[in-house]
Amino acid sequence: MKYQPINNQLFIQNRKNFTDALKPKSLAIFNSNDIMPTNADGTMGFRQNADLFYLSGIDQEESILVLFPDCPDPKHREILFIRETSEHIAIWEGYKYTIEHAREVSGIKTIYWTKNFDSILKVIGFEADNLYLNTNEHFRSSSEVQTRDAKFILQMQQLFPLHKYERSALIMHKIRTVKNAIEVDLLREAVRITELGFRRVLGFVKPDVQEYEIEAEFIHEFTRNRSKGFAYTPIIASGENAIVLHYIENSRPCKSGDVILLDVAAEYANYNADLTRSIPVSGRFTKRQKDVYNAVLRAMRFGNSIMNPGILWEDYQKECEKFIESELIGLGLLDKTDIKNQNPDQPLLKKYFMHGMSHHLGIDVHDVWNKYRPFEAGNVFTIEPGIYIKEEGLGIRLENNVLITENGNIDLMANIPIEVEEIEDLMQK
C-alpha cells in the first residue's frame, strides 16, 4: 500500500461499534469486492469494499470478515479470511498479506486462508439465529452487474434457508457517519495532498493550456504524496463546460477570459477529500465573474453557519436555497415578483442551482447516510454551492469539507486558497 500503516485501534473500535448493535446470536459476514473485467485478459483496478475496510483495514481481494460475538468458541467470534499466496502469485502479482501482517493490520487474532471459509462457516453457522449480510443501500446506488454481495446472499439463502436474515447496512450507515479522531486524521491527509495539487495547478494554468494537462498536474502531485490517485473522476471544466455538472471529458483548451471549474481531490488510505474551486484562466476574474464568485462564496459561508447538530438535511437544503435565491436576485438573474408567483414545486432558482448543497464524506466520496437522521457531532460534510449561467458560459462552484463538532464546525480545507484576491495573487506569481 502507498499509505502509511493505520492504527488498528480504529478497526477494533469499529468492529465493537458494529457488534454492539447486533441482535443476540447473530453472525455477520462481509466480503471484499470483486476484481471486475474489462476486455481480453484485462481487469479494472481493485478498490476494497468500504464496509470490510472500515471493519478490518484489510485492503486486498478475496478477503472475508466474519463477526459472531456470541459464538460458543471464543476464537471464532472474530475471523478474518485472506487469500493464500504462492510463489506463482508472488512472481506475477507481488506481495500479499501474511497471516501475521493481517493480524497486525486488523487487530483480529483468528485468521485463516479464504479456501477454509466454507468448512468453518458450516461449523459455526448453525449456532447463529440471525445472519447479517451486506448490500449497497446507498440511495444513489445503481448497478447493472451482479455484485459479490448479491451473489453471496443467494448462496447463504440456499445454505441456511431457515435462518433469519438482517441488513448490515442499517448499522453501517449509522456508525460510519460519525468519524473518530483517527478517521479525521486520514481525511486531513487526503485534504493536505489535495491542497498541494491545487497550489501546483494555480502556478501552472495559463491561456490555451489543455484541460487534460491540468488533470495531469493534479495526479502527479497526488501520487508523489502516497495517494492512489483521484478520489473520484476529476472534473476540469473550462468556460461553458462548467455548466455540465459531471463533465469529465477534460479534453478542451482553456481560453483566455474563461473560468475553469476544478472539482478534483485526492484519496488517502481509502479516505477521500472532495474539493471544488473556480479559477480564471488568465489569472484575473472579470467584474462579472468576481460578482458571481463572491455570491457563491457567501452561500458557502452561510451553509457553514447553519450546519449545526440537530438540523435535518432537507431543512438545511431549503435554507441554503433561500440564501442562494437572494444572491441570484442580486446578480440580476431572478426577479422578486417572479419568485412570488413561482410554482413552489418548480422553483426558479433550479435553473441556476440544481444540485444538493452537501453530502457526507468518508471512505466513500458520497458516504453512506440516512437523510432523515439529523446532523450530529462527528459528521464530515461537504458544503458545495454553485451558480451556473448557461447564457454567459459561466459556471462557478466552491466546495470545502467540514467536520461538525459540539463547539462549532472545523473547516478541514481552511488552508486551501478560496478568496478572489488570494487566487489571483497566487496565479500571478
Image (cartoon, rainbow, N blue to C red):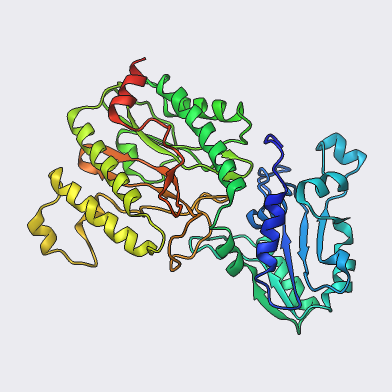
Image coords of residue 107 (percent x, y):
78, 52
Image coords of residue 365 (percent x, y):
52, 49
Describe residue 404's horizontal placement relative to residue 23 as left or right: left
Q: Quadrant of residue 6?
A: top right
Q: Nearer the viewer, residue 141 or 337?
A: 337
Describe residue 8's horizontal placement relative to residue 378 as left or right: right
* Quarter occupied by the C terminus: top left
Does any portion of residue 5 appear in the rendered image? yes
Does any portion of residue 207 appear in the rendered image? no
Image coords of residue 193 (percent x, y):
54, 32
Q: Residue at x 72, y 55 (%)?
A: 12
| Residue at the bottom extreme of this rendering | 162
Image coords of residue 161 (percent x, y):
76, 82
* Quarter occupied by the N terminus: top right
Q: Residue at x 80, y 55 (%)?
A: 108
Q: Residue at x 84, y 79 (%)?
A: 126
Query: Compared to 108, does 172 lie above or below?
Result: below
